[in-house]
Image: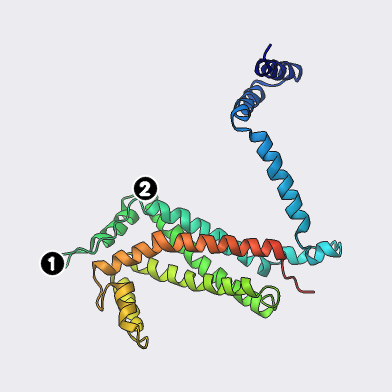
Amino acid sequence: MSLERKDDHDHKAWMEKRDLTPVESIYLSVLVWFDKRLRIVDYLELLEDLYYKVNMQMPKSHTEQYNLDNKFWYWYPLYALGSFSTIAYIVAAISGALLGFYYAPAAAAADGTPTVAYQQISLIMTDLNMGFFLRSLHRWSAQVMVAAVFLHMLRVYFTGAYKEPRELNWIIGIVLISLTMVFGYTGYLLPWDQLAFWAGQIGVEMALSIPLIGEWVAQLLFGGFTLTQATLQRMYLLHVFLLPFVVTALIAVHIGIVWMQGIAEPH
């Protein structure tokens, strides 16, 4: 009997002895089939070993280091704002991706009729099943994220959690709150209604007020000195294709550093 056939026979004999349910038997058979071809169990063991080695080197938090029974600071609401903002970001990302199936970043309009972008928003709000709920979920999760990030930064500042050795993470946090504001601004312009138009016009004026490079910044971000299809296209590209990847990467780095350094709890 070959070695491969012997392994199959051993697996079948083992499963027969265990008195497994049909579901468990199917699950183990599938796992064995994949493991023989992809060595899944070997790689899982390597990952488990790596996890425990890394976890043993992680710094202990204050309550873990001194074996305190009171875990109050872990559950204190102000220390959950970072996680809260991350959850709000995930909800906004998922709902925004679903809205992207129905939204068209087109500013074309004639004879005073609404723009295509605004018509698509109206379609989502009125004709799409649960469209009103979907857009409201996206809007409110984005606003909750902005508020949570702002309060999180205040908590970090007033508790001194930005001090050594957490300076790098504080800088990343400043970059993240800045990108969050850009996220909100670009999303605010996408409906391309009157509010979006005047908000865009204010953005153009602010860009032009920058010394030396103002005109260049206005051309780059808004496609000119007046709002056109190029402006809406740029806002859409920033909001959907650039900012999500940059922000997601920075959030991952930010959370990774917190995991390595531990929570800066008040002593």
Mark 1 falls on what kind of element?
loop
Percent x, y for residue 224?
Answer: 26, 76
Q: Residue 113's quadrant in the figure?
A: bottom left
Farthest bottom residue in view = 211
Q: Quadrant of the N terminus?
A: top right
The correct choice, above or below, for 130 with respect to 267 in the image is above
The correct choice, above or below, for 83 with respect to 47 in the image is below
Percent x, y for residue 186?
Answer: 38, 68
Residue at horizontal 24%, vertical 77%?
226
Mark 2: which amino acid?
Answer: Asn
**In this rendering, position of residue 195 left or right of residue 44:** left
Mark 1: which amino acid?
Answer: Asp
**In this rendering, position of residue 239 left or right of residue 22:** left
Mark 1 neighbour density, 10 Å: few (under 14) some (14–19) many (20 or more): few
Q: Which residue is mark 1?
A: 111
Kindly identify which numbered label has been placed on residue 129: 2
Percent x, y for residue 134?
Answer: 42, 54
Mark 2 falls on what kind of element?
loop
Residue at horizontal 59%, vertical 62%?
253
Residue at horizontal 34%, vertical 49%?
128
**In this rendering, position of residue 220 left or right of residue 18:** left
Q: Nearer the viewer, residue 180 or 212?
A: 212
Farthest top residue in view = 1
- The mark lying in front, picked from 2 and 1, is 1
Residue at horizontal 37%, vertical 47%?
129
Regarding residue 195, the answer to whether it shows in the image is no
Distance from disc 2 to disc 1, alpha carbons, whole Å, reads 30 Å
